[in-house]
Image: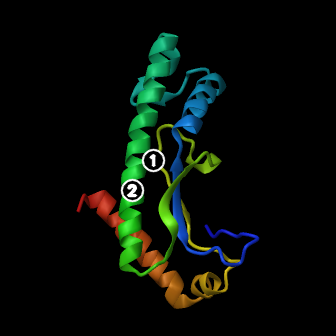
Amino acid sequence: HADSAPNDQARGASVYTLSAVASDAIAERLAARENKADIIGGINLGVEAPEVGEIMVDLARRATNNVSVQFADLLQKALEEQEVGFRGEFHHFAAFAVLKAPDVPSVLLETGYVTNKADAERLFSDDGRKRLARGVARAIERHLTGK
């Protein structure tokens, strides 16, 4: 994903993982929406007491967030190796909808700002896209192999 800003000086890549406040709200909405009939962590929440379902959603969310944060760290290191510049601190927390699944680790990578001339040149160049792709691929490989 690429970002934009009214300030054309804003530049650099960043990654987001779900914030604790937002994930608590999604855990509550998930239970209401699915009527606790989903299977999370191998347990069918539809046949368990409500308290058990709430605990299982919370545990799944915590484990998922931990994996997401670990992957964000791998992604930062891999993109640094590809000399991709960052927007201040690389890792941020937000309640983006794409991050809200309680049982699927996820990050949102903002590859740079299309409203910044230098970032846009990198994003629209073959070399820039290849460096981003190599960084993401390296992070995925390290995540999956544990190396």
Q: In this view, does 59 lie above or below 75?
A: above
Q: In this view, does 107 lie to the left or right of 116?
A: left
Q: How is the image coloured?
A: rainbow
Q: Is residue 66 above or below residue 41?
A: below
Which is more foreground, mark 1 or mark 2? 2
The residue sitting at the top extreme is 49
The answer to which of 73 and 28 lies nearer the viewer is 73
The reply to whether callout 1 and callout 2 are in contact (CB within 8 Å) is yes
| Mark pair 1, 2: CA separation | 9 Å
Q: Is residue 24 above or below residue 99?
A: above
The residue sitting at the left extreme is 147
Q: Is residue 14 left or right of residue 121?
A: left
Mark 2: amino acid: Phe
Q: Name the residue under label 1.
A: 105
Q: Which residue is drawn at 43% across and 24% down?
A: 56
Q: Name the residue under label 2.
A: 71
Q: In the rendered image, which quarter contains the N terminus? A: bottom right
Q: Is residue 58 above or below residue 53?
A: below
Q: Which residue is drawn at 37% across and 59% down?
A: 73
Q: In the rendered image, which quarter contains the C terminus? A: bottom left
Badge 2 marks a residue whose secondary structure is helix
- Rendered image quadrant of residue 4: bottom right
